[in-house]
Amino acid sequence: MQLGFIGLGAMGRPMAEHLLRAGHALSVWSRRRESAAALIGQGALWRDSPAELARHCTVVFTNVTGSADVEGLAFGPQGLAQGFAPGSLHVDFSTIAPSAARRIAARHAAQAVDFVDAPVSGGSVGAQNASLAIMWGGKSALAARLQPFFEVLGKTVVRVGEAGAGQVAKACNQMVMVAAIEAAAEAARLAAASGVDFARVRAAMLHGSAGSRVLDVFGGRMASREFAPGVEARLHHKDYALLMEEATRIGAPLPVSAAVGQQLNAVMARGWGREDTASLLRVLEAGSATDPA
């Protein structure tokens, strides 16, 4: 069976490498061929377009930035849909709007192609270590077909429901995680304003009920003032825009998320979008999030 992979960035490249190392035949495509050079060197085959890749592959994985990117790859000029045979499977690891995932699934279904939205959590480290959490939406009958691939990419695999459900789960994940980053930033700001060393506060908190991976990783960056990107803030900003759009569409009030979204807007307004989301602390230090300098 030939697999295809599109989206060879910080997340996609190590995921594709794991599939290769597991013995799967792999075809790749990227807007910039140099992004695929390392994979080609490991045995992956280059294809000249998404359509050509789909003609050679039974299962295609995509991992790109947003809804429009996935829809363009699937249905744009020389898109996957022009190459897929009936019975093919498109698995998307991107974080996109639930409504977009459902729309893509419906368009593929019209050509007898299956679609699974399978966003992941764990960041680039999780991708490199094959320890991702994979939350997927799609037909339950696809589980056995997906398992050989998912088991080499992640440690936790959960089918949440039908198409779009994986994206709802990812929205919930991002909502809780980034709110926790903001809470860590506020704790750091309170400690500093009180004349107390946040590094020591954090050390105590890590062993109490507030201890968490977010406090460990992002709180650590705040304590050491390391704002080089582990996760670029612009990506969390994009994810928050998606979840707030979905909340508005279905009429779900999310007051805390709305406030966190304003803080992320301030990060972007100050030009820190390509720095780490720990930069939420810098917004608090700079002043009002709603009136960025």
Image: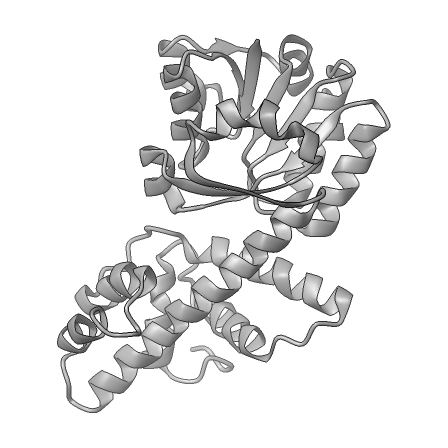
Question: Is residue 269 in view from this perspective?
Answer: no
Res 246 → quadrant: bottom right
Q: Residue furthest bottom?
A: 194
- Residue 276: x and y in percent read 35, 57
Q: Disc count in the image?
A: 0
Above or below residue 196? Residue 263 is above
Q: According to the image, what is the colour scheme of the structure? A: one colour
Which residue shows up at 33% across the image and 52% down it?
Answer: 229
Q: Nearer the viewer, residue 149 or 79?
A: 149
Residue occupying the point 75% across, 37% down:
104
In this picture, residue 207 sits left or right of residue 241: left
Q: Position of residue 201 (x, y in %)?
A: 18, 78
Residue found 15% across the figure and 89% down from its top: 195
- Is residue 138 rendered to the left or right of residue 2? right
Q: In the displayed image of the protein, which residue is found farthest to the right?
A: 110
Where is residue 269? Give x, y as percent.
Answer: 48, 68
Q: Position of residue 60 (x, y in %)?
A: 61, 22
Residue drawn at (48%, 19%) of the image: 33
User: Looking at the picture, does residue 277 appear above or below residue 79?
Assistant: below
Give the position of the N terminus as an image quadrant: top right
Res. 208 visible in picture: yes
Above or below residue 56? Residue 60 is below
Quadrant, the C terminus: bottom left
Is residue 276 left or right of 107 when viewed as pictured? Answer: left
Res. 57 image quadrant: top right
